[in-house]
Amino acid sequence: MPCGLLLVMALLLLVHAVFSTDTFDIHTHDSYFIIHWRYIDIILAAGILWMWILYRILENFLLSRSFTWAHVISLAILLAMLYLLIPTHPDTISRPKTYCETGHSISLLAGSAAIILILAHALFAINLIVGVTRKFASLAKKA
């Protein structure tokens, strides 16, 4: 069932991409970047659909369903961090922030997200490598 949760997350992202009018503003030194959330949603949905395809193809080789659930839930936590902790509307920001305040909060969020993403995908790799090793070991014992 974790594959179903991945599909639901991708579908929610695609629905958000269709109806979203928000932008994500990045201030860096003397540059100002404005990225529409639609593009972020589509890229994230494509990545999650890729994970869904991988899980469907490799489900017979994976070691544990609990590792799969842990990976999928960590991806859901990462998406929740992305959408709940980054302010997109001007009225959600109480006052103008200086470069140091904005840079620190975005750096903290990006660092936390990177750690979660690295640990989640390491868990997927461990799940796959140990599962394939055990599968081939059991096939070698039968032969």
Image (cartoon, rainbow, N blue to C red):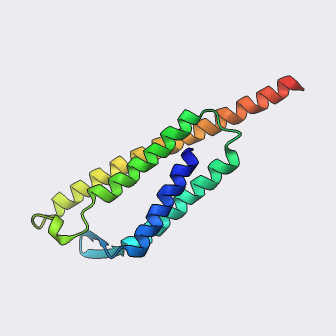
Q: Position of residue 10 (x, y in %)?
A: 50, 60
Name the residue rendered at 64%, 55% in the picture. Answer: 53
Work out whether 62 lies above or below 22. Answer: above
Res 40 seen here: no
Work out whether 9 lies above or below 34. Answer: above
Q: Nearer the viewer, residue 14 or 24?
A: 14
Q: Position of residue 111 (x, y in %)?
A: 34, 49
Residue found at the far top of this picture = 141
Q: Quadrant of the C terminus?
A: top right
Q: Is residue 95 left or right of residue 28?
A: left
Q: Position of residue 93 (x, y in %)?
A: 15, 65
Res 127 seen here: yes
Work out whether 73 lies above or below 50. Answer: above
Residue found at the far left of this picture = 95
* The quadrant where residue 17 appears: bottom left
* The quadrant where residue 104 appears: bottom left
Instruction: Report the number of discs.
Output: 0
Q: Is residue 86 left or right of residue 54?
A: left
Name the residue rendered at 60%, 33% in the picture. Answer: 64
Q: Position of residue 62 (x, y in %)?
A: 65, 38
Name the residue rendered at 18%, 71% in the picture. Answer: 90
Q: Quadrant of the N terminus?
A: top right
Name the residue rendered at 40%, 68% in the picture. Answer: 16
